[in-house]
Image (tube, rainbow, N blue to C red):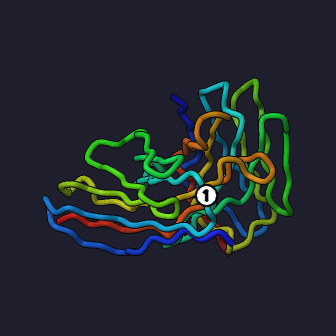
């Protein structure tokens, strides 16, 4: 089974702190994603990466950056956390193309971040 | 960019009844439409998907239909059970879009005994 692991499930950080959210996948997937989930807004794409050291902005990249130094690891960085970044963050990965041609992506369990 | 609208936001049904969740999309180039189920405290999991060259797909008690002309697709769950209670998300993506999925806002399904 595909496993996407987010190392921190629950974090509480202070305003202005630098926050790292780490994600590791074990299926040698090329693509990795960071989504943010808020009630009533669904899942919104922050950043994605289709290869090592490659990244592209998603729909809501402001206030975030990412790092992908190794294929299996994709980190989300909040340079200076703010209270409006309190949310659940979901990491995901996918192959370039699924076995049946689909674009299935696999999610981790999520990281709940509270900024106080 | 793509915009996916999902309705209803909450749905309550009696055990054994059917549940239907509907989504519309805006980008006519979208060709892949998955549905995800998210249980409390967990990440979303794919339950069924459909591609634009297919009008309907079934997997046991769940089915998805796609109307490309109207740009809408629906999830149908028959003989609902308490374990079907969860949040369901529809999504859309297109070839060459880097596997980026645009999600709907979710439907909280509650199956009552």
Q: In this view, does B74 lie above or below B40?
A: above
Q: Where is residue B85 in the image (x, y as percent from the top left)?
A: 63, 68
Picture coordinates of residue A15 (x, y %)?
A: 14, 61
A47 or A9: nearer the viewer: A47
Q: Label 1 lies in what chain?
A: A
Which residue lies at the image location 68% right of the left edge and 74% below the top edge?
Answer: B82
When asked about the image quadrant of residue B6, the answer is top right
Eyeballing the image, is A54 above or below B46?
above
Quadrant of the snapshot with the C terminus of chain B = bottom right
Q: How crowded is mark 1: few (under 14 residues within 10 Å), some or many (20 or more)?
A: many
Q: Name the residue under label 1.
A: A29
Question: Is residue A53 in view from this perspective?
Answer: yes
In this image, B100 relative to B59: left or right? left
Residue nearer the viewer, A45 or A71: A71
Which residue appears at 73% of the width and 47% of the height?
A102
User: Residue B51: image x %, image y %?
Assistant: 77, 40
Q: Which residue is drawn at 40% across and 40% down?
A: A57
Q: Where residue B12 sits in the image (x, y, percent)?
A: 62, 60
Observer able to see residue B11: no
Residue at screen point 61% across, 65% down: B110
- Secondary structure type for disc 1: loop
Left or right: where A9 falls relative to A105: left
Whether B38 is drawn above or below A55: the answer is: below
How many numbered marks have been drawn onto this rendered protein structure? 1
A1 or B110, which lies in front? A1
Q: Dividing the picture into quarters, in which one does residue B60 lie?
A: bottom right
Q: In this view, does A53 lie above or below A90?
A: above
């Amino acid at each position: 089974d595909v496993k996407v692991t987010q190392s921190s499930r629950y974090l509480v950080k202070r305003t202005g702190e630098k926050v790292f959210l780490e994600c590791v996948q074990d299926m040698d997937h090329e693509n990795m994603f960071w989504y943010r989930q808020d009630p009533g807004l669904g899942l919104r794409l922050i950043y994605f990466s289709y290869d090592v050291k490659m990244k592209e902005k998603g729909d809501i990249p402001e206030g975030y950056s990412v790092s992908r130094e190794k294929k299996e690891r994709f980190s989300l960085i909040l340079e200076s956390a703010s209270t409006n970044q309190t949310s659940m963050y979901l990491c995901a990965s996918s192959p370039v193309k699924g076995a049946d041609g689909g674009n299935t992506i696999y999610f981790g369990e999520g990281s709940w971040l509270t900024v106080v | 960019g793509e915009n996916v609208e999902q309705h209803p936001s909450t749905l309550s049904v009696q055990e054994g009844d059917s549940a239907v969740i509907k989504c519309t999309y805006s980008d006519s180039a979208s060709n892949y439409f998955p549905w995800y189920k998210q249980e409390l405290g967990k990440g979303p999991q794919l339950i069924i998907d459909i591609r634009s060259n297919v009008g309907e797909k079934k997997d046991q008690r769940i089915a998805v239909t796609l109307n490309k002309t109207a740009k809408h697709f629906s999830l149908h769950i028959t003989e609902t059970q308490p374990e079907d209670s969860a949040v369901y998300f529809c999504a859309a993506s297109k070839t060459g879009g880097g596997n980026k999925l645009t999600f709907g806002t979710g439907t909280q399904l509650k199956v009552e005994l």
